[in-house]
């Protein structure tokens, strides 16, 4: 995909003192995968993350994405919105397979889709994201072994691909607007950026 929105491989890797290991932090539109014993962390509001791993080798990763509002065609399986979501999932799965994961060993844990962006309630963006990720994984025959979707609270997700362990912390109180602002910026970028070359997304 040469132009348009691309999933960015997260570059924010740091040492996490709390868990005593290397960690990668991913933001909206980013993903990360690893063969190492490390942590991947993100904070989700309306966005969703799929944590996918090979349960035999421990190769695993996480994405963080939102379906752009596809307008009147959003119920169509070939809408630009669905193509974007599919692309976000394929990038992660393909990189895991290239790194040596086997499709038949893949399992997923899915998180997010909260109703936290007050301006987005009309299109139920969190619910749409949650339903998309469930439907996509079912269609790909990737078993969902755990999920924490919808609700009204943002959540911080800590994923350890090697063991498959996930810790989820519900953020009952946000001390600032960083998360909401970040997701709203991401959503408006999705509205105006072409996906997969020639497909234009209009708000």
Image (spheres, helix red, strand yellow):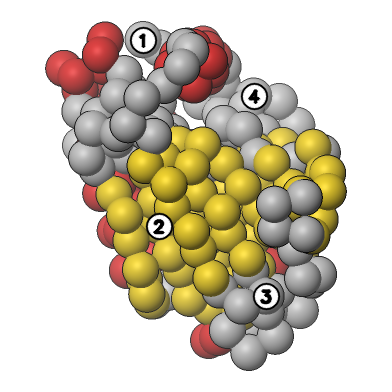
Q: Residue 203 carries which label?
A: 1
Q: Earlier in the sequence, mark 2 or mark 4?
A: 4
Residue at 71 percent across and 25 percent down: it is: 3
Please identify, in this view, whether the residue under mark 4 or under mark 3 is nearer the observer.
Answer: 3
Residue 140 position in % (x across, y down): 41, 70
Disc 1 and disc 2 in contact, CB within 8 angstroms: no
Q: Is 153 placed left or right of 111 in the picture? A: left
Residue 162's tag is 3
Residue at horizontal 48 percent and vertical 59 percent from the top:
167
Q: Mark 2 points at which residue?
A: 110
Identify the residue shown where x is 65% and y is 39%. Answer: 26
Q: Is residue 56 found left or right of 179 in the rendered image?
A: right
Q: Is residue 78 visible?
A: no
- Seen in the picture, residue 83 relative to 193 is either above or below; the reply is below
Task: Give the mark nearest the N terminus, 2 or 3.
Answer: 2
Helix, strand or loop at label 4? It is: loop
Q: In which quarter of the image is the N terminus?
A: top right
Between 129 and 94, the one lying in front of the other is 129
Precedes in sequence: disc 4 or disc 3 = 4
- As measured in the structure, the alpha-carbon distance from the residue carrying label 1 to the one carrying label 2 is 27 Å
Decide which of tag 1 and tag 2 comes sooner along the chain: 2
Estimate the x, y position of residue 77 in percent, counting from the top left.
29, 45
Q: Where is residue 23 in the image (x, y as percent from the top left)?
A: 75, 51
For mark 1, give the secondary structure: loop
Gap between marks 2 and 4, in whole Å? 26 Å
């Amino acid at each position: 995909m040469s132009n348009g929105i691309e999933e960015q491989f997260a570059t924010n890797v740091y040492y996490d003192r709390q868990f005593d290991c290397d960690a990668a932090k991913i933001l909206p539109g980013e993903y990360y995968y690893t063969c190492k014993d490390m942590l991947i962390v993100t904070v989700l509001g309306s966005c969703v993350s799929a944590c996918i791993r090979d349960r035999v080798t421990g190769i695993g990763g996480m994405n963080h994405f939102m379906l752009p509002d596809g307008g009147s065609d959003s119920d169509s399986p070939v809408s630009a919105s669905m193509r974007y979501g599919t692309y976000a999932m394929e990038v992660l799965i393909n990189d895991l397979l290239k790194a040596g994961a086997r499709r038949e060993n893949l399992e997923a844990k899915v998180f997010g889709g909260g109703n936290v962006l007050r301006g987005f309630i009309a299109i139920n963006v969190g619910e749409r994201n949650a339903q998309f990720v469930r439907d996509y994984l079912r269609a790909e025959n990737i078993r969902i072994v755990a999920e924490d979707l919808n609700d009204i609270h943002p959540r911080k997700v800590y994923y350890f691909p090697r063991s498959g362990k996930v810790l989820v912390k519900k953020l009952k109180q946000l001390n600032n607007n960083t998360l909401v602002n970040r997701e709203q910026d991401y959503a408006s970028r999705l509205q105006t950026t072409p996906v997969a070359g020639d497909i234009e997304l209009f708000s």
